[in-house]
Image: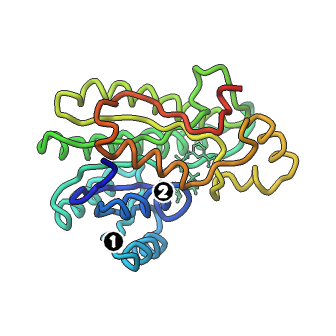
Amino acid sequence: MLELKNKVAIITGARRGMGKADALLLAKAGAKVVVSDISEEECQQVVDEIKNSGGEAMAIKCDVSEKEEVDKMIKKTIEEFGRIDILVNNAGICQFKPFLDLTEEEWDRTININLKGYFLCGQAVAKEMAKQKSGVIINIASIAMGQVGVGFPAITHYCASKGGIVAMTEAMALELAPYNIRVNAIAPGAIDTPMAASVKDDPKVLEGTLNRVPLRRMGKPEEIASAVLFLASDASSYMTGSVVVVDGGWLAG
Ligand SMILES: NC(=O)c1ccc[n+]([C@@H]2O[C@H](COP(=O)([O-])OP(=O)(O)OC[C@H]3O[C@@H](n4cnc5c(N)ncnc54)[C@H](O)[C@@H]3O)[C@@H](O)[C@H]2O)c1
């Protein structure tokens, strides 16, 4: 049920971190993978890794906040692979800044990449999926999504974007269900990627973080990728509009 043979998957923000882990695992499950990010060269390295393991993949440079680049990515994917079955909206940034110092430009940049980017990619891909009457969209949110009784200081704009992603996921799930397109979100906790380097590299911050995690460790990108594979596959065929929390127990604490 976890097999993705003949499926085509686009993963944004896939040159490193969770997106790269998703790309490697979905390719291993048999999907043809589009490895997309702001640096084509680094995407190509992930593609080479997939190809060396016998998989099929293609690198496409795409800034998800630019509609023109998103449209080009969809066009190229259709030209090369003929269809799109899976989108993992994963590209994101997380900038620490106290609320009182946050500038309008910083707010806009985060919202444009983390939230508008998911809309642009989600809509463009859903138009293709609607034609074929099938598809899966996975939106990577965060436990900083709000509504769960756990707040995160100094990343207001990031929290707003992640809360927006969850609300968007539910609305998309409702509108796209008639086209047999499932839309779900994943809310990771603290995962060991370059984005979380400031947590990992500061012993005090790391200790404070791990004190909130019952499993007492950061998650690995591969532990998010396995949730992505589950949601991308038929193993989750009755799931849409859900948020899957993968956080080592943080929100349960
Ligand atoms: N690491 C964590 O603890 C954590 C926790 C919860 C949620 N997340 C979310 O997981 C996702 C993946 O993050 P990660 O931890 O792997 O971080 P990461 O920084 O390693 O990866 C994010 C990727 O997004 C890319 N990106 C940034 N701006 C882009 C743009 N405009 N267009 C296309 N790509 C762009 C980056 O180049 C990078 O490769 C993000 O959405 C992040 O918010 C991370």
Q: Residues within 10 Å of mark 1 (few under 14, many from 20)?
A: some
> Residue 63, located in which quarter of the rendered image?
bottom left
Position of 70 with respect to 220 (left or right) is left
Q: Which residue is mark 2?
A: 19
Helix, strand or loop under label 2:
helix
Label pair 2/1, CB-CB below 8 angstroms: no
Mark 2 residue's CB less than 8 Å from ligand 1 = yes
Q: Nearer the viewer, mark 2 or mark 1?
A: 1
Pinpoint residue 8: horizontal percent, then vertical percent: 26, 57
Q: Residue at x 48, y 56 (%)?
A: 19
**Residue flagged by tag 1: what amino acid is it?**
Gly
Mark 1 residue's CB less than 8 Å from ligand 1 = no
Position of 100 with respect to 231 (left or right) is right
Residue lying furthest front: 1
Q: Which residue is mark 1?
A: 55
Pinpoint residue 174: horizontal percent, then vertical percent: 28, 24
Q: Residues within 10 Å of mark 2 (few under 14, many from 20)?
A: many
Q: Residue at x 26, y 45 (%)?
A: 124
